[in-house]
Image (tube, rainbow, N blue to C red):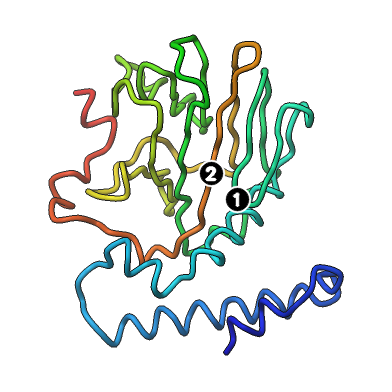
Amino acid sequence: EAYATLQGIGVPLRSARVQKDIDQFQRQWEEAMMSEEAGKSPTQLEEEKVRELWPQEYLNHLGHDLLVLFTYEPKSNATLHENTVRLTGIGKAFTTDSPKILAGRSLRCMVRFAEKDPQDDRYEMLFTGGRSLVITRDGMRVTGTGGEDVVLSKTVMQYTFSIRTDRKAVELQMNDSGGWIPIAPMTERLEFAWQLGDKRAIDLKVRVVPLGMMNKGPNNKSNNKSINDKNK
């Protein structure tokens, strides 16, 4: 009932005057969904369970709300459609501070190269302390660790991962399974950059998911090591 009410609020009504109420209703609905799950099984949710309790259109809506918070430079090289932004040419995007929409949630990302030809195209998430999560057509890696780059995945056209922050670090989860790995110091804002060749593109699709809904996987303890540990 709460979800249906939210969907009935038209865009013209989403002014600053009523946005506070809209946010409150969204939070009440989220808490109801999490309470429903807490009364069932202690096991972690599978992907189909996430889709059941968190309708796809709502996850996409939250992703869109996050993407519109970014400042894109130049604007002409970033085309937003729902919860996906198509990146072309060279550019960067950033938020002025840590988005409140991510409080108690994680950012689930899918980075896809639109063309198959191997080129020097590059997507990069920038963090404090000189750390970066770099994605190219040759793989995904963490740079700026003070040692060799930490390779996380190799040679695919599409990369799926999740980012979350706690009080001490930015953490990453690969393919929505396994443990969370600290990869960078705590960051105050979100920032990413891209560099693509002529007439090529990268699609960045995001969903904002409650932390309680993420699948930790069976090997969480063994996988939950920092990038610094992997460099030793």
List x then y, in percent, for residue 60.
Answer: 56, 58
Label 2 packing within 10 angstroms: few (<14), some (14-19), many (20+) = many
List x then y, in percent, for residue 15.
Answer: 85, 69
Q: Are marks 1 and 2 in contact (CB under 8 Å)?
A: yes
Label 1 packing within 10 angstroms: few (<14), some (14-19), many (20+) = many
* Residue denoted by label 2: 205
List x then y, in percent, for residue 131.
Answer: 45, 27
First in sequence: mark 1 or mark 2? 1
Task: Identify which residue is drawn at 71% across, 36% down.
Answer: 79
* Residue denoted by label 1: 83
Task: Identify which residue is drawn at 29% across, 32% down.
Answer: 227
Quadrant for the N terminus, please. Answer: bottom right
Check disc 1 and give the amino acid type: Asn
Rendering quarter of residue 6: bottom right
Task: Identify which residue is drawn at 66% across, 37% down.
Answer: 94
List x then y, in percent, for residue 16.
Answer: 84, 69
- Label ID, residue 161: none
Q: Residue furthest front?
A: 116
Rendering quarter of residue 9: bottom right
Under circle 2, the secondary element is strand
